[in-house]
Image (cartoon, rainbow, N blue to C red):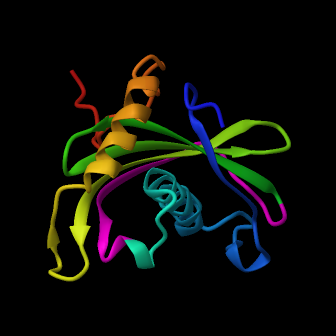
Amino acid sequence: MDENAPLPLYQGKVQDHWVDEFGHMNMSRYVEACDYATYAFWELVNAPKGLEARAGAEYAVVEAHVNYLSELRGGDPFMVTTQLLSADAKRFQLFHCLYKSTTEELVASNEIMALGFDLGTRALMSFRPEVSERIEEILARHATLPQPKNAGRAIGLRKKS
């Protein structure tokens, strides 16, 4: 895996039960596909420790922004790439790009903010030192990448002059 580029962390195929009455993947499933990539990122920075070995030191997504740019239909293969935009001792900001695999068309993006979270105390926590170190390594590599076009975008209507 080339960590000097957005990370290809998840791929799948649009399941029939993901398709809504309009014939395309329901909007919640775009978020779900990107959520799988968030989890894959977390697994990457925790490796080789799995869920049991982490003893409740996990993460919680506290904010998300989705841009729907095109559509996927039933059976379409897709892939999600992930870019680490920023991080500190307790937070990381990811930008996911969801592509239709057959055409490499960008169909959606999903930007998230996640916090370190202790499942035992149900409270925020700093990342374990080895996780922070791994996040910093990826962040240093991704710092050279261009900022995604929709990163930091907010929802709002433009006021007419």
| Residue 36 picture location, percent across and down | 55, 63
Residue at 46%, 65% (x, y): give it: 49
User: Would residue 51 be counted in the magenta stretch?
Assistant: no
In-image side of 119 versus 26 (left or right): left
| Residue 143 picture location, percent across and down | 39, 22
Residue at 76%, 72% (x, y): give it: 15
Which quarter of the figure has residue 106?
A: top right
| Image: 55 above or below 140 | below
Residue 54 vs residue 41, the one in the foreground: 54
Residue at 57%, 46% (x, y): give it: 108
Residue 44 vs residue 160, the one in the foreground: 44
Magenta segment range?
54-75
Residue 5 vs residue 133, the one in the foreground: 133
| Residue 98 picture location, percent across and down | 62, 46
In-image side of 82 versus 58 (left or right): right
Labels in figure, total: 0
